[in-house]
Amino acid sequence: MKRLLITSVTGLLLSTSVAVADSNPHYISLGYVNSEIDYAGSDLSGSGIALNGSLALNSGLSLLGGYERIDYDSDLESKEYSFGAGYRFELASGFTLGAHYKHLKTELDGDRKTDSSANQLGGEVAFMLPDSVVSFGKKRTLQAYFNQTRYSNDDISEGGAAFRVYLTDSFSVGVSYSMDNDDRSDFQLFIREDG
């Protein structure tokens, strides 16, 4: 009986996830990041990679994960791991609001190695741009977001925007820019595959 119940619930969750892929898709994205940061009184530039993904559990709820590695000037290396959950709500066709919680683990390796953990709350608004505004690609998405990250000794507020163009029904290319109150700015070019 337990096995039948577990199998039924698992099947229901999987079929629900597949059915809502258009409104809350599974995705994986890979990006190239160009970053500038004020670290210990010095302005540093760096570049690296960002890998992010989402596993849709139903029409609104998703599990989130990410990894970012940036090598800065002066032999400073930054790694960030994140995992959490997000919820998206479609207000109208092509217009969504979202919120997420992520737990972050950050490692800085330079003159000395430091590890820190943080909790992040964030929100976003995203909408599809009509052909009358931009006419290339199958569809286009514009997104604005805000994150509040709390470390044990610091709070960081970050805002940004992203623009994505779908070249097929599931494959898109995009660009994003973000900046925070801790003198860090990131410019990213990325590709994304929705499942």
Image (cartoon, rainbow, N blue to C red):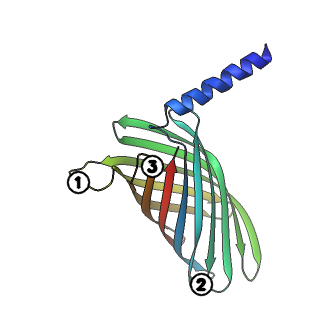
The residue tagged 3 is: 124
Which numbered disc, 1 or 3, marks the residue that appears first in the sequence?
A: 3
Q: In terms of depth relative to the viewer, which is nearer, 61 or 18?
A: 18
Task: Measuring from the top left, give residue 129's x and y in whole percent.
Answer: 30, 50
The residue tagged 2 is: 41
Q: Is residue 30 left or right of residue 79?
A: left
Residue visible at 35% across and 42% down?
95
Local packing at callout 2 (Cα closer than 10 Å; few below 14, some 14-19, many 20+) is few
Nearer mark to the viewer, of 1 and 3? 1
The residue tagged 1 is: 133
Q: In terms of depth relative to the viewer, which is nearer, 15 or 87?
A: 15
Amino acid bearing label 2: Gly
Q: CA distance from mark 3 to mark 2?
A: 32 Å
Helix, strand or loop under label 3: strand
Q: CA distance from mark 1 to mark 3?
A: 21 Å
Which numbered disc, 1 or 2, marks the residue that appears first in the sequence?
A: 2
